[in-house]
Image: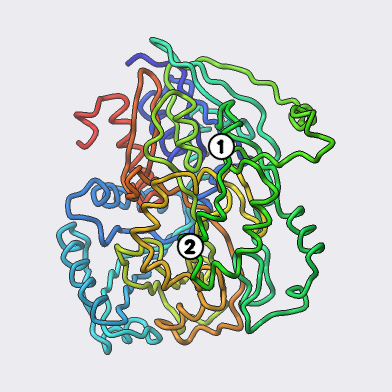
């Protein structure tokens, strides 16, 4: 394939690693990386606990297992050469009951089949020799599991791209593509200003939930606000985030997600806590799928007023010989805008992390719960991070926006996209029984910390504070099955990365290698 101009859309860790791979293979090519964020690793890649995931539970010989193994092979020498922090601290998966102990046996068999070195089971006495404050009936120990700084890793990869003559076009929103016989026309515009992505520090871990209400045992004066004040707060909370990759159809059917949620989760305590907020938002918006606010009476004869008031962001085009899209949270929307099908869809999940300062004897490395296939977002870890503090998390729940990091922000378009997707409800039905058990910890920080203290009781709950918040781009197919594998589709000179494996950051260098093999050598050679 003859190429001189290549565009990579997406400056997350995989997109930047891919740009680096292309500059290495084609040193004379002009490589440009586009992203609407203001920096690399702005989203999922830059919001993790830093664990270098060896994919202990991956199916033996699966593509995920191969990518994780190859990813570590490539990662270790790179971080060593660049001086990026990397600490091999070991990981314990701790079983709390016999069912979890049985799953540890299965994970051990898989890890051994995947040639992960040194993995073994430990009884209680052996467990406490490794981590004195771990509590459980059995543990699996992976001594070579490590932590690193994935943001610094992405920045180092970006430095290589720039040194090889590549260009980064940040704050540039790609809106679509026109695929021609030997080239791709890329459409773009200046990105809208980013919304605040900080995580509010609630002052303590004693009961603030993801909807901004309080646990019944920790209510303060804010819980007694009158209805008009609360409605005013809703006005402040709902933002019209930049519409991205949605096409021109903004007149779809009304989705009353309040009734849908109530029919499925109405008996759950966590739903009762947030129902009023959901109801108010549903009443104020006629079409969550489009993210548009119902106009005031005097505005109803001026449907285009809101569009006219927006800053003009003129669209431009550039032509490339090859375009590869690693758009993460926007992968499905940009694929559909380019003529691909909408399978798999992206459902965003918010992952909150918490921090606590504690001496090394509390947790030396990584202590985690046992993965449960029937509850894929219930895994918890306590991680001794590269900065020596402890990171607790993730605390995962369906996100209220694909790029909304503030606790009280909503994107009705994104919420409508999620609850209007049948595959999401099939996934929810398949995991409803286990999700109900973990629902309280999903919306309550104090309940989450108590879950952590079941396997590390030495954690001081009063010292836990909010840390980073990430949004995970989870691909789900129409049958409600999580797509946790590398899935790539190509038409002509345009390639779309539709999903990545769970160990996406760990395997980034290997994933870039695999994508490049598929694009330049063809699918038959992609797994070589």
**Please, which residue is most extreme toward the top here?**
181
Residue 74 seen by the camera = no
282 horizontally vs 262: left or right? right
Residue 259 seen by the camera = yes
- Residue 208 appears at what percent x and percent y? 63, 72
The residue drawn where x is 49% and y is 44% is 420
Q: Secondary structure at mark 1?
A: loop
Q: Which residue is mark 1?
A: 253
Within the image, what quadrant is residue 528 found in? top left
335 horizontally vs 511: left or right? right
Quadrant (top left/top right/bottom left/bottom right) for the N terminus: top left
Q: Nearer the viewer, residue 341 or 322?
A: 341
Q: Which residue is mark 2?
A: 396
- Labels 2, 1: front one: 1
Within the image, what quadrant is residue 408 found in? bottom right
- Residue 122 appears at what percent x and percent y? 23, 81
Mark 1 nearby-residue class (10 Å; few <14, some 14–19, many ≥20): few
Q: Is residue 505 above or below residue 526?
A: below
């Amino acid at each position: 394939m003859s190429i001189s101009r290549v565009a990579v859309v997406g400056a997350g860790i995989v997109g930047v690693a891919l740009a680096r791979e292309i500059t290495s293979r084609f040193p004379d090519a002009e490589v440009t990386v586009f992203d609407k964020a203001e920096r690399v690793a702005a989203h999922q890649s830059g919001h993790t606990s830093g664990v270098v995931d060896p994919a202990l539970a991956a199916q033996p010989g699966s593509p995920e297992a191969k990518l994780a193994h190859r990813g570590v092979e490539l990662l270790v020498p790179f971080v060593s050469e660049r001086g990026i922090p990397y600490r091999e601290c070991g990981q314990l998966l701790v079983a709390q009951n016999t069912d979890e102990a049985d799953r540890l046996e299965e994970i051990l068999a898989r890890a051994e089949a995947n040639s992960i070195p040194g993995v073994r089971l430990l009884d209680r006495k052996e467990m406490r020799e490794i981590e004195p404050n771990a509590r459980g009936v059995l543990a699996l120990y992976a001594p070579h599991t490590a932590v690193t700084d994935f943001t610094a890793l992405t920045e180092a990869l970006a430095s290589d791209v720039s040194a090889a003559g590549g260009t980064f076009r940040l704050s540039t929103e790609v809106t679509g593509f026109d695929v021609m016989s030997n080239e791709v026309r890329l459409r773009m515009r200046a990105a809208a200003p980013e919304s605040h992505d900080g995580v509010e520090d609630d002052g303590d871990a004693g009961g603030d939930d993801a909807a901004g209400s309080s646990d019944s045992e920790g209510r303060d004066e804010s819980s007694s606000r009158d209805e008009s004040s609360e409605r005013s707060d809703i006005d402040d909370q709902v933002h019209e985030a930049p519409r991205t990759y949605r096409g021109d159809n903004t007149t779809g059917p009304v989705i009353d997600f309040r009734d849908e949620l109530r029919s499925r989760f109405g008996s759950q305590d966590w739903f009762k806590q947030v129902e009023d907020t959901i109801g108010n938002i549903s009443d104020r918006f006629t079409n969550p799928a489009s993210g548009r606010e119902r106009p005031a009476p005097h505005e109803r004869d001026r449907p285009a007023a809101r569009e006219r008031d927006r800053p003009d962001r003129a669209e431009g085009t550039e032509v490339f010989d090859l375009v590869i899209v690693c758009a993460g949270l926007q992968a499905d929307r940009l694929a559909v805008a380019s003529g691909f099908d909408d399978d798999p869809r992206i459902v965003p999940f918010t992952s909150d992390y918490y921090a606590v300062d504690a001496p090394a004897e509390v947790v030396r490395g990584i202590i985690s719960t046992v993965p449960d296939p029937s509850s894929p977002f219930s895994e918890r870890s306590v991680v001794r991070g590269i900065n020596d503090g402890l990171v607790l998390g993730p605390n995962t729940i369906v996100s209220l926006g694909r790029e909304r990091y503030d606790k009280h922000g909503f994107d009705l378009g994104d919420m409508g996209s999620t609850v209007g997707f049948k595959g999401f409800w099939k996934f929810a039905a398949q995991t409803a029984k286990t999700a109900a058990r973990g629902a309280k910890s999903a919306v309550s920080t104090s309940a989450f910390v108590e879950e952590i203290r079941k396997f590390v009781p030495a954690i001081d709950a009063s010292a836990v504070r909010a840390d980073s918040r990430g949004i995970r781009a989870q691909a789900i197919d129409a049958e409600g099955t999580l797509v946790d594998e590398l899935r790539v589709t190509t038409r002509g000179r345009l390639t779309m990365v539709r999903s990545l494996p769970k160990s996406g950051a760990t395997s980034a260098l290997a994933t870039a290698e695999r994508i490049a093999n598929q694009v330049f050598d063809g699918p038959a050679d992609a797994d070589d």
